[in-house]
Amino acid sequence: MNEKGPKQYIEEIECLKAQIKAFEKTALDRKMIEAQTRRFVTILMDSNDAITVQDFDGKIITWNRGAEQIYGWSEAEALEMNIREIVPEDKRKETSAFIEKIKKGELVESFETKRITRDGKILDIWLTATKLVDDKGNPTAIAITERNITKFKKADKVLRQSEERYHLFADSVADFIWTTDMNLRFTYLNHSVIYLLGYAPEELIKQNVAVVLTINSSRTALKAFEEEVAIETSGSPDLSRTRIIELEHVCKDGSTVWGEVKMTFLRDPDKRAIGILGVTRDITERKKMDDKLMQAAEEWRVTFDSIVDLVSIHSTEFKIMRVNKAFAGAFKMKYQEILGKTCYELIHKSKEPPLHCPHRHTARTKEPSLAEFFEPNLGFYLEVSCSPIFNEKGEAMGVVHIAKDITKRKELEKNARLAQLGELVADMAHEVNNPLMIISGNAELSLMEEIQNEKVKDHLKIVVEECQAAKDIIQRLLKFSRPSKGVVKVININNMIEAVTNIIAHQFNLDNIEIKRNYADDLPFISVDVQQVQEIFMNLLNNAKDAMPEGGVIEITTILEKGFVRIDFKDTGCGMTEEVMKRIFEPFFTTKEKGTGLGLSVCYGIVKAHNGELKFESAPRKGTTAIILLPLKEAKEDA
Amino acid sequence: MHKILVVDDEPRIAKILEEYLTRMGFHVTKASGGEEAIGILHSDVKIDLMILDMKMPKVGGFDVIKEMKRINKNIPTIILTGSIDAEKYLVDLKVLGYSSEDILYKPIELLALLDKVKKKLRMAP
């Protein structure tokens, strides 16, 4: 050891002084550093994150309050522990690896891992490891910040699971479910898109929806979108509203399918629309069915309107619900003028259904029924059949009416009846004429005997006379049943009428009846059985006279009408009721006290034999017009 | 004396005609139907005039006329009818040489019949 001189002590003292000074300064610095360090340590020690320091062997050097809270060991306990004690078995390798990495020079390492708590719970941890070095830069320890992310992980897991479930659900439904952003680009498509459109979801993602729509449907979709956006910006829209539109989609192979698209806006937490959620259902089949239904409905309508009968559908309370074209045409009315009215106010102009109404019967019995009647408001005979309409439950929903104009059939029936009657009359005539002949013959024979009693003679004479009168009646009957053609001549009808009026002029004058003539000048000649047609004129003029016991006017008009010469005898007499009009041509039907009821039936037979028409227009107290139509046959007048 | 054959299935009419014509001085033979009349026509009985009803059961008046023509007898005939049935045969009757003048409609006035009978027999009225 070397001896120290005084100089050396002085130097040492000076040195010590300097050192003390330096020390004092250092102490001051240290104080500052200590204060600063305390602040850091306080922050670190109080942090909610676990902040620990370990050496490279894993021995815990520092253990803050966050670590105490997260892992459950106190600082004192932890400082006795190795970090490996809080690392689960399966993470030990990972831990060794990152320690090695840091040792070799990596500064910071962050990753997700797991740790065990004191009571054995496994925590999800976000770990950041930092290398601590000494003054010379040599690694001394590792500082680790650990954040317990178990809760987030759980929430995240739940979220992910729910999303997965949702996607699973979305993929398992047949409907095509999708979302778009507000630029109408797909942001999600479920698996069903492949079945509907033939595209895989990933082929369409980020594509505009227009890719899978026809041009028309694109327009429809865009229009709907714009309208919905407009609703968004106006007032307070219903945020949960949905909209359904039908769009025609274009598949990958170019074919098209119809989809019913139900859409709603996707919203951010501020309820702003940020996209669209849509569910598209394949309705091609339904569309086809709709088309078929439409076609069926159209077919039905066309058929309904093609029926020439008057078809109408009524509520059970007689209200008209639907009519066909022929019905509307018969009334010359528009559909809306007809619908809602009752049939009795429309057809019969009455306040309640008439007694003969078959609808009444059907509504009561739920059975079909049929009626024939003359409807004066339409001017023809109707056959109306009513059938009840039942719904699926068998309840009566209404009644369908089919009304036929049976005027022609009625005419034929009448003719057939008249023909039958004619035969009957012919038979009867024969049967009656024999007894008449016997009566009359015996009376005549008796008259040849010596009869003193004049009275008896007179009685017998009356018998003979009346037998002849009866014979005349029978002859007329026979004429009616088989009008015999007499002499056919080509004549001017005006001249013929004049010939008849000349005969009756005197008598009519006495009865205060004026005859007005309204003859067409240019009538062509027609060929008629003069005697028979004169009989018609005579009959009609006499009928007119009988209708005017107080006197009146008979206006005779002749005119050319569609291939016929028309002769009208119009009187100002008492007219006829409908009932009388209907029976007017029936043999033996008469309203006169002394009439035989054969006049008009004979006239009718004659006109028919001429291929003409005889008809009447009349109403009570409004007079009667007898109309005769005789077919034209141009010819020169016979001399 | 002229002999008249009256053919009618109604016996009372035949009787009236018989009685009347007998009274008027004719000899009358009656037939109650077409068959009997044809029988008489086929016999040697001489008939000057026949009054023939048209409508009879089985063999009618027209059948009698046809048969008469067939066997070349040409007896003047007055046709009686109760209806316009005769008109049905009018055309055929015309072909056989008859006219509406030869037809009388029942019930006939006996005087009118007598008139016709006399004309047919070319007797003075």
Image: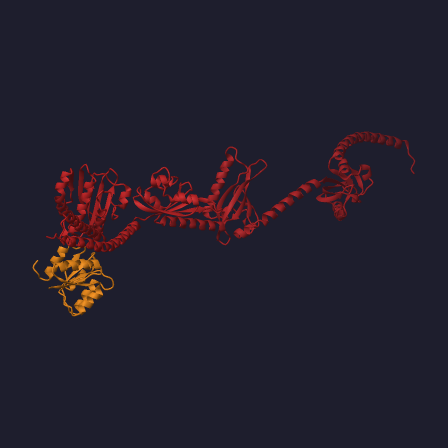
Query: In this rendering, would A362 be left or right of A66?
Result: left
Q: Quadrant of residue A47?
A: top right
Q: Nearer the viewer, residue B54 or A151?
A: B54
Residue A401: image location, x then y, percent:
38, 46
Quarter of the figure that contains the N terminus of chain A: top right
Query: In this rendering, would A140 be left or right of B25?
Result: right
Does any portion of residue A615 appear in the rendered image? yes
Q: Nearer the viewer, residue A222 or A34?
A: A222
Residue A223: image location, x then y, percent:
47, 41
Q: Nearer the viewer, residue A312 or A137?
A: A312
The colour scheme used to paint the residues is: by chain
Q: Quadrant of residue A152?
A: top right
Q: Nearer the viewer, residue A448 or A308?
A: A448
- Residue at point 51% right, 36% down? A232
Does any portion of residue A199 appear in the rendered image? no
- Above or below, A334 relative to A433: above
- Residue at point 36% right, 37% down? A351
Residue A122: image location, x then y, percent:
74, 43
Residue A595: image location, x then y, percent:
22, 45
Query: In this rendering, would A160 be left or right of A379?
Result: right
Count of number-bearing discs: 0
Tint of chain A: red
- Residue that sits furthest to the left in the current view: B124
Query: Which chain did the image draw in orange?
Result: B
